[in-house]
Amino acid sequence: MKSKSFAGVALTIALCGIVGGYFGPTVPRTSAAELSDVPDSLKTFSKVFAAVESNFADKVSSETAIYHGAIPGMLRNLDPHCTFLDPKEYSDMQQKQRGNYGGVGMEVNSDKNNVVVARPFHGSPAERAGLRRGDVIVKVDDKNTLGMEITKVTELLKGPRGTPVQVTVQREGAKGLLNFSVKRDQITPSLVDSFWVAPGYAYIRILSFESLTINADVTAALRRFDEKKIKGLVLDLRGNPGGLVNQAVDVSDHFLAKGQKVVSHHGRAEEERVFVAKNGRQTEPYPVVVLVDRNSASASEIVAGALQDHDRAWILGETTFGKGLVQAQFPLNEGAALLLTIAHYYTPSGRLIQRDYSKGSFFDYYYQNKEGIKNEKDVKTTDLGRTMYGGGGITPDEKFKRTPYNQFQRRFLIARVIFHYGSHYFASHPLQLPKEWAPDEAVIADFRQFALKEGVPFIAEEFNANKDWIANQIQQELLARAIGKEAADQSAMVFDPEVKQAVASMPKATDLLNKVQRAMAARQGGVQ
């Protein structure tokens, strides 16, 4: 993302020039002479706004009419990604980009109209104080939080480093409420997971590119692995919604040769800008398989597209979302901001990443991602001459269709009965399990009775047919509580069928890598 002065948007300046005086309690009259140089459409807007504020049956808030009405309405007619951010939203976005904040260091979510602890971050003040996954947050300091919106609870938990906060929770199996005194600290949650998934095969998952720390975290992960020991790398970008383009470029830089193009963008008012690998790979290259799905978007598509166009990685999974619009930040008055599309992203070969949004509704655009559509008007080739199509996200080299949840599984996930069972189980068991733990028949039977008490409808045949899935879900839930989410995720990924397929597909990535090396050597005169 790039930052510009709001003064750069002529149309919006004109709009603000007209409505700027309307943010007070009364509507000043504007003479025809003052509007003589303003487009007729904006004169009409001024008259409509004045009429609404003066004559509508109820009092109209200018903030509501402009911030939540006129501006979002205008942006919705441009494209699906132009966005107006109020001061709170813009501040939150900037905080995410910085990658740190003052707080207690835990992830929370909503459950049964209350806010519960999803996980304390490893080594955080929340973990050190003793807060656990499943704890229901009852009070923060002297404020009752039962039934409170999750955003309000998180705001109460945040605060300057070193300041204390009292967190009162309800924990199944505990006698009465539990009080924890937590001293806030600077929290830097990592959006990068890394571990070995098989001997010699490293795994890195990037959850998003929203933070300025992403590339540093990837660099640190590669150092921990010691790249000379890596036989192959699985780079998991599934579900990654994107973020900062510079982080995508820097991550791609690890695997490309110095000077190779990563991505470019240009638009009506923007000259073409090309991003290249500035450093290039620092060690001997190893094969890379990139995992993507329909929710991989924006910056994650930049990485996948760059590695695919240069034949540096084998792409496995589903066709990505197709979000290739450059959003520039235009700060406004009072701390608000406009995210405005100013250009389109193109892969190194020149194919457009953005999917067509002109046909159908925005609902269709977001939720009806169609596989296998080839844009015959946007055909490009990779460095090795493989044919690729643009204008519809990044199409994988190898398809992997994950088995969707069946009705029984969806029912249990929506009811969050497995999450609730974790609290039930550890209400009568010590919070200790070996890393290799798996539920036995007694645990499965206990869970079955618990699900019945929770009121989740099922029949015996359904339960028995899904026993393996149930056992796996219970295993991950209880391990996440006993040994930490990171260790539980590692255990889960080792058995993830798509990760297994990625390791099995390493020979294909190796073949691409060997061909690229031979081609580069030939160009340099090393091979005749």
Image (cartoon, rainbow, N blue to C red):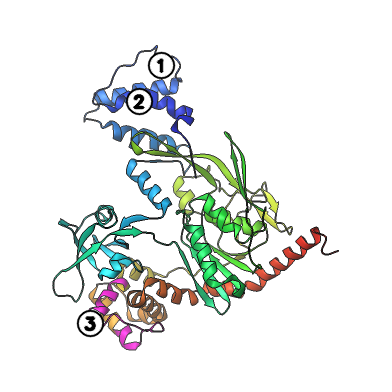
Identify which residue, 517 or 365, lies in the foreground: 517
Vertical comparison of 325 with 271: above or below:
below
> Please, which residue is most extreme toward the left here?
176
Question: In the image, residue 173 lies at what x, y percent?
Answer: 19, 77
Q: Which residue is mark 3?
A: 428
- When asked about the image quadrant of residue 386, the answer is bottom right
Vertical comparison of 396 with 49: above or below:
below
Looking at the image, tell me whether mark 1 or mark 2 is earlier in sequence order: 2
Q: Name the residue located 51 percent from the left edge and 65 percent from the top edge.
A: 220
| Element type where label 1 sits in the image | loop
| Element type where label 2 sits in the image | helix
The boundaries of the magenta stretch are 419-445
Tell me, yes or no, if residue 446 can be seen here.
Answer: yes
Q: Which mark is residue 35?
A: 1
> Please, which residue is most extreme toward the top here?
33
Q: Which mark is residue 19?
A: 2
Q: Which mark is residue 5?
A: none
Determine the CA span between mark 1 and mark 3.
Answer: 74 Å
